[in-house]
Image (cartoon, rainbow, N blue to C red):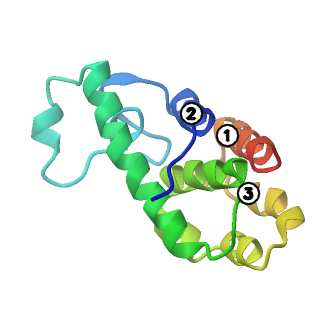
Amino acid sequence: MRHITKDGLNLIKHFEGFEPEIYLDAAGLPTIGYGHLIRKGEHKMFENGISESAAEALLAKDVWTAESGVLRLISVPLTDGQFDALVSFTFNLGSGALQRSTLRRKVNREEHHEVPEQLMRWVWAGGRKLKGLMRRREAEIVLYQS
């Protein structure tokens, strides 16, 4: 199976940041570590926080899920930068968002010049346009075009 490069992983880590305690993300969802969405039944295991090494192990599992989603949904060859950018996007928003997106259709049609515009459509959370998401999408665009 194909994996994200170090550059792609660093982009995710940069934008997620490390948080050792449970917090609510921009969408109001409980999160910990490097952007790990706390699922039903997991809350108790994180009530005392998480170490950075444990967060990195959890990040690796979450990134694997995002990689799997990209590999399942994208049917054309991708450069490392393109793959990394799409894994970052999928890590952030989930495979469902990629699956139902025009972004996926543009990539699968190899309309790569239209990908930046499609990525920039995904900068909203909780009904607000967020500067952090705008910066993340801009960084994903740079990675996608590298």
* Quadrant that contains the N terminus: bottom left
Separation (CA) of disc 1 from disc 2: 17 Å
Task: Residue at 56%, 33% (x, y): give it.
Answer: 6
| One can see residue 2 in this view | yes
Q: Which residue is mark 2?
A: 6
Where 112 sits versus 33, above or below? below
- Whichever of callouts 3 and 1 sits on the residue coming sooner in the sequence is 3
Quadrant of the rendered image containing residue 107: bottom right
Q: Give whichever of 82, 13 is nearer the camera.
A: 82
Lower sequence index among marks 3 and 2: 2
Q: Residue at x 47, y 65 (%)?
A: 69
Q: CA distance from mark 3 to mark 1?
A: 10 Å
Residue marked by disc 3: 119
Left of 105 or right of it: where is 70? left
- Is 135 drawn above or below residue 103 in the view shown? above
Q: Which of pointers 1 and 2 lies earlier in the amino acid sequence? A: 2
Badge 1 density bin: few <14, some 14–19, many ≥20, Cα 10 Å: many
Kind of residue indicated by mark 3: Leu
Task: State left or right for residue 117 relative to residue 8.
Answer: right
Residue 132 lies, in percent from the top left, at: 65, 35
Position of 60 with respect to 17 (left or right) is left
As drawn, the label of residue 136 is 1
Q: Nearer the viewer, mark 1 or mark 2?
A: 2
Q: Position of residue 29 (x, y in %)?
A: 37, 47
Above or below for 55 versus 115: above
Give the residue at x 23% y 24%.
Answer: 50
Q: Which secondary structure lies at badge 3? A: helix
* Mark 1: amino acid: Arg
Element on which disc 1 rests:
helix
Rendered position, 90 above or below 44? below
Q: Is residue 128 visible?
A: no
